[in-house]
Amino acid sequence: MANITKKGRQKYQICIECGRNPQTGKRKRKYETFNGTKTEAKKRAAELEHEIKSNQFIEDTEETVGSYLKEWLRNYKHNLAPSTYESYDIIINSHLIPALGQKKLSELGPQDIERYQAQKLSSGRKDGKQGGLSTRTVQYHHRVLSKALKKAEKYNLIRENPAKLVQAPTPNTPEINPLSKDEVNKLLDQAEGFAHDLIYLGVKTGMRRGELLALRWSDIDFENKKITVRQSMTKVTGEELSFNKPKTKSSQRPIQIDDEIITMLKKRKAKQEEYKEKFGNKYDNQHKLVFRKNNGKPFLPQYATKMFNQVAEAAELGEFRLHDLRHTHATLMLKSEVHPKIVQERLGHSSITQTLDTYSHVIPSMQKEAVDKFNANFDFGLN
């Protein structure tokens, strides 16, 4: 309902109730000073009321991009996995807010976002090194900002989401860096204990780092030679270690294993029993993990990565990541003529298309081998 107050000769203040802010719960009011007759002021008030009722009214506030993004992230946190929240927090507080945070939310335009993306691609690193962020990373920044601004548009805090008008950078196909069989053996030769077994299981199953570290003895069926992936480990800075179900249904999957893995796991279990007896009541048996310290406590994901990097460096493998064990598993299976559908299921991909797109580098060599085999079996000859 509009309230019109006379402020002087042919000068009126129009005040209209606009409901409540869906984020803060505070009552919203629209004030406008109008010069003209009272009849004209009433007409203008009716126009404003119509805009509000038809969702065309945009609240004129001093809220900045920075304050809005912080509040949006707080409210959206419960929708995110811990590791995803941590990445959103870094993007918003270390990148978006320093660059765009002081600007009024209602004044943020597509040109601002384009300039932001260009700057991040050219010189956006925050680790002290020169150069810009990758196109994939800046694309992720765009996705986070667009998601936040979409909510602002829904709440009529902005007329239109400016990120929708900006083309996000298109990343190149990610470079897959699999190891050869000889390189895998070289890597294993440099590892021992926890490092050796983690690498061995990773390259033979394609499991992710968090899945390997969260693997429990109850997830292993020794009789049927099968591992079932039921959870993943996450450690967010400043928060407790957490175990969560994999994000997708396809990631919760059975993986068939061989006798060599069974032997390795049984040896590992026997060794744990020795340490359990040695530590007695001080042994931490809360999570019953396959990979844990001598006192039973879990290995943190960051430690596993650090350990792996040291082994890879000792093996002189160059830029090779722990996650590349997963790529190695998939590549070696495809080259061994395992059907892509089986590889998809072992990796926990949501579709076979994802598997084929990710490992398209393997397909050309597979096609050549297929042609050679076809010709060997069907020699039609030419007259």
Image (spheres, rainbow, N blue to C red):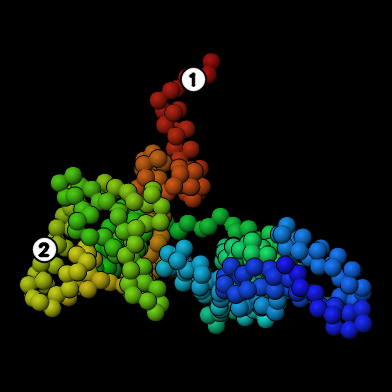
| Mark 1 closeness class: few <14, some 14–19, many ≥20 residues within 10 Å | few
Q: Mark 1 is on which residue type? A: Gly
Q: Quadrant of residue 162?
A: bottom right
Whether residue 9 is situated above or below residue 117 in the rendered picture: below
Q: Nearer the viewer, residue 285 or 227?
A: 285
Return the x and y of residue 15 as percentages of the image width and height.
75, 74
Asked whether, in this view, residue 298 is left or right of residue 326, the answer is left
Q: CA distance from mark 1 to mark 2?
A: 61 Å
- 180 and 61: which is toward the camera: 61
**Front position in the image: 358 or 285:** 285
Location of mark 2 (residue): 270
Q: Say what amino acid the circle numbered 2 marks.
A: Ala
- Single out the mark in the foreground, 1 or 2: 2
Q: Position of residue 116 (x, y in %)?
A: 68, 72
**Farthest top residue in view:** 383
Would you name the residue on which mark 1 appears? Answer: 381
Residue placed most toward the observer, 78 or 365: 78
- At 44% from the left and 47% from the top, the residue drawn is 350
Instruction: Name the spot of residue 97 as percent of width and height, x first.
Output: 61, 78
Residue 1 seen by the camera: yes
